[in-house]
């Protein structure tokens, strides 16, 4: 997801709840804009060269990750000090579902890579199979419903325990299956057609862009189709944000909860003639949305400081008043949120 494709403009509920009632970071970046490396950095606060997950295959949920880094995620640190921790949705692309990672009291992890239908979940150690019935199986809604249930149960069974939840939805990742009620939307959306859209070739840039020409008409139309479908999938994410915050209000925890909305990386749809994808060292792939609301954060704050995905784990620990381990590469941006002003990093 990226600002450059207009994704946040397509999410009015999230903007109202988090943007208008919290802070928006304009310069948040993914240090390695690829699913598994980026997610590993978010969980550990480490650069890719330190957690050694370089691609969506090499050590993605592999032995080194499981033995060295998985026991040092922010979930484990919070669980160790008494938090009731929960993870819902996509984990790492090669997660095989045979175990529950350390650090999570409630675990509903998607087996393997992104899907909306016909997938399996590891539900606290048991495999749950889902099929193609929208009302029972659409993954974004399953995550929403499981989250609301977890909040209610936690309040009932563990009323004095603080809560950490990670809600990890595949949207707008492929296969871009939108909920039926949203499949008519964004028919003529062209927000992805930025100034760099179909700007090619680029002899002043790296070899790949030097050798990438302008898109054919069929490729141009494909970017329009994919833009439309991606924004459609985000409507269910917008619903998720609203429903979770409504439940927090019902439980009286709305003003006592930090909420972070972000993505693992950006995306290109025709920029510099590249039809679709990520992993490029340009702003459309590395810039990510970052909205934060919670205690002592002023409304409608826009922060221009540069932050990165390696900063998420230290920030979450800081929010819980847990010392940030020295091995983490990132640093907490909670002071920026409390100040509500911009300073040099």
Image (spheres, rainbow, N blue to C red):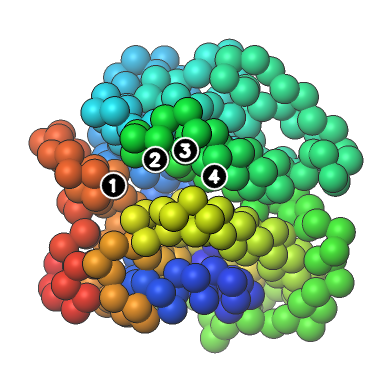
SS category of the residue bearing label 3: helix
Label 1–label 2 contact, CB within 8 A = yes
* Rendering coords of residue 110 (x, y %): 62, 31
State the residue position of label 4: 168
State the residue position of label 1: 316
Q: Which disc number belongs to residue 164?
A: 2
Tell us which disc is closer to us: 1 or 2: 2
Disc with the residue nearer the chain's start (4 vs 3): 3
The answer to whether residue 219 is seen in the rendering is no
* Rendering coords of residue 81 (x, y %): 24, 28
Disc with the residue nearer the chain's start (4 vs 1): 4
Q: Residue at x 85, y 64 (%)?
A: 181
* Rendering coords of residue 82 (x, y %): 29, 28
* Rendering coords of residue 1 (x, y %): 55, 62
State the residue position of label 3: 155
Tell us which disc is closer to us: 4 or 2: 2
Q: Residues within 10 Å of mark 2 (few under 14, many from 20)?
A: many
Q: Nearer the viewer, residue 20 or 216?
A: 20
In the picture provided, is 285 more to the left or to the right than 142? left
């Amino acid at each position: 997801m990226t600002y450059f494709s207009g994704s946040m403009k397509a999410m009015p509920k999230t903007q109202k709840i988090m943007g208008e009632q919290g802070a928006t970071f304009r310069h948040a970046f993914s240090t390695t804009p690829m699913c598994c490396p980026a997610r590993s950095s978010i969980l550990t606060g480490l650069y890719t060269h330190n957690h050694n997950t370089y691609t969506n295959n090499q050590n993605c949920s592999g032995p080194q990750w499981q033995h060295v880094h998985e026991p040092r995620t922010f979930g484990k640190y919070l669980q160790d000090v008494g938090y009731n921790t929960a993870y819902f949705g996509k984990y790492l692309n090669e997660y095989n579902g045979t175990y529950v990672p350390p650090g999570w009291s409630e675990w509903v992890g998607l087996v393997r890579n992104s899907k909306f239908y016909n997938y399996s979940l590891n539900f606290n150690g048991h495999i749950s199979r889902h099929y193609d019935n929208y009302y029972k199986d659409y993954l974004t809604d399953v995550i929403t419903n499981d989250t609301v249930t977890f909040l209610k149960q936690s309040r009932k069974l563990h009323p004095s325990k603080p809560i950490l939840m990670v809600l990890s939805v595949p949207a707008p990742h492929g296969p871009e299956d939108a909920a039926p009620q949203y499949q008519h939307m964004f028919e003529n959306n062209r927000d992805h057609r930025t100034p760099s859209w179909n700007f090619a070739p680029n002899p002043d840039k790296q070899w790949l862009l030097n050798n990438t020409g302008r898109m054919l008409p069929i490729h141009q139309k494909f970017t329009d189709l994919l833009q439309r479908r991606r924004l459609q999938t985000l409507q269910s994410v917008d619903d998720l944000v609203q429903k979770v915050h409504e439940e927090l209000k019902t439980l009286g925890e709305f003003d006592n909860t930090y909420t972070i909305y972000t993505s693992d990386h950006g995306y290109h749809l025709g920029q510099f003639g590249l039809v679709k994808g990520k992993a490029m060292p340009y702003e459309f792939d590395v810039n990510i949305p970052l909205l934060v609301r919670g205690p002592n954060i002023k409304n409608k704050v826009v922060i221009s400081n540069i932050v990165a995905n390696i900063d998420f784990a230290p920030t979450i620990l800081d929010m819980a008043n847990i010392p940030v381990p020295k091995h983490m590469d990132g640093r907490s941006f909670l002071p920026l949120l409390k100040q509500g002003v911009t300073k040099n990093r």
